[in-house]
Image (tube, rainbow, N blue to C red):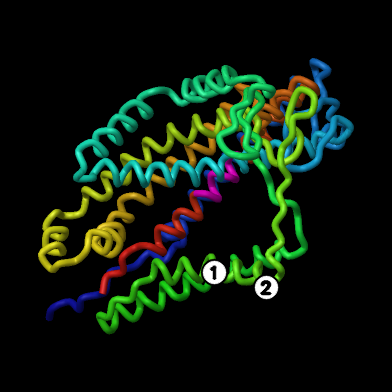
Amino acid sequence: MAEQAHPPKTNRSILHSIAFRNVAYQLLLAAALIFLGWYLYYNINENLDRQNIATGWSFLSEPAGFDISESIIPFDSSQTFARIFAAGVLNTLHIAFVGIFLATLLGVIMGIARVSRNWLVSKLASAYVEICRNVPVVLHVIFWSSIIRLLPHPRQALEPFNGAFISNRGLMLPFPVDNVLYPWVAFTLVLGIGGALIFTRWARYRREHTGQYIAVFWPSTSITIGLPLLVWALGGAPLSWDYPELKGFNYQGGISLSPEYIALLIGITVYTGAFIAEIVRSGIESIHRGQIEASRALGLRHSFIMRYITIPQALRVIVPPTASQYLSLTKNSSLGVLIGYPDLVNIGNTSLNQTGQAVEAIAIMMLVYLTISLTISILMNFYNKLVAIRER
């Protein structure tokens, strides 16, 4: 009589569970990192105490004792280190976001120009990319700072148009005088942008389900601009300008951009824009040429092919590396310390020298840049998922 087969014994111990071991390994790694961080922090504090160097975060509530040349929020030397760090963070965010916008605009234009069938336009765009991306960004910043310093004094300032002045003190522009209607105009502008997005999505949905093409550019532009213009016109169309005027050694009034801000902005924008242009070019050329030729054979217009065939597919290639360029631009804004722009690193270094608390000052700078970089990464990943082509 044959022996009855028994099912193999299973080891039900939790130690042999793959899921349990994965979690345990991660907990052990986290505990090791926390212990290492605590060990380093403890030793640093011990060494600093032995050398009678102050530690801790109480210095943030003490008066800074020094001024900065420009700040988005009001600041003077009697205010605290916490406030001056906040001013530095806002200055960094300001130049980073403006730089990202301008570098994207410049990179997209140059990237499309590189694949243009116009020989001169293509070669000029290629020359820009090859020159600017092969020169270190620090030299870009120093070069533009030197150029701006060579501009005339305020009394001999250049005036490209009425009310605008360019000198070695920066760029002075007229600025609208505040009015109670303007917040409502800004609110309707936001509504207009939302309405344009809804209209664009509706047109896309209708095209995908009925095949009917609905032009969206002019209607979206009209909704975005027309709504705030209507509110402004119904409110009496108030508009008066505050023009900069030369008083003493510099201009007063209007809005002014310091030479340090302009040099840093141009330097990091031109440098990053060259890399974005190459990313855009590679994204466009990644689309199989057969699709473009088939579209032309169907009689589709060039703008239609670019908007509905080339760009949607190219974005899958363009968006991930562009996010890396945004991170690089944000970190390159720290080069403002070379030309005197009061960004976070510049203010952090001065605070470090004033207080002697190097660990805390550097920790603040690292934490801020880490937070900004992670935020940009999260937003770009979200946008990447938003524009991803969904398989049917």
* Discs 2, 1 touching: Cβ within 8 Å: no
Q: 92 or 62, which is in the foreground?
A: 92
Q: Is residue 207 magenta?
A: no
Is residue 133 something that shows in the picture?
yes
Q: 164 or 128, which is in the foreground?
A: 164
Q: Quadrant of the C terminus?
A: bottom left
Q: 149 or 29, which is in the foreground?
A: 149
Tell me the quarter of the picture where residue 204 sits. Answer: bottom left
* Three-letter code, disc 1: Gly
Is residue 367 something that shows in the picture?
no
Q: Residue at position x 68%, y 46% from top?
A: 175
Q: Main secondary structure of the magenta part?
A: helix
Can you give x and y, in whole percent of width and height, for residue 5 in the image?
Answer: 20, 76
> Above or below — where is 168 with respect to 308?
above
Q: Residue at position x 30%, y 46% from top?
A: 112
Can you give x and y, in whole percent of width and height, for residue 221 in the image?
Answer: 46, 66
Tell me the quarter of the picture where residue 73 sits. Answer: top right
Going from N to C along the chain, the mark reached first, 2 or 1, is: 1
Can you give x and y, in whole percent of width and height, for residue 322 in the image?
Answer: 40, 45
Badge 1: how crowded within 10 Å, few (<14), some, or many (20+)?
some
- Whether residue 295 sits left or right of residue 255 in the image: it is left
Badge 2: how crowded within 10 Å, few (<14), some, or many (20+)?
few
Element marked by disc 2: helix
Q: Residue furthest front?
A: 162
Q: 207 or 356, which is in the foreground?
A: 207
Q: Which residue is mark 2?
A: 234
Q: Is residue 373 magenta?
A: yes
Q: Residue at position x 47%, y 75% from top?
A: 198
Start-end of magenta stretch: 369-376
Q: Residue furthest bottom?
A: 210
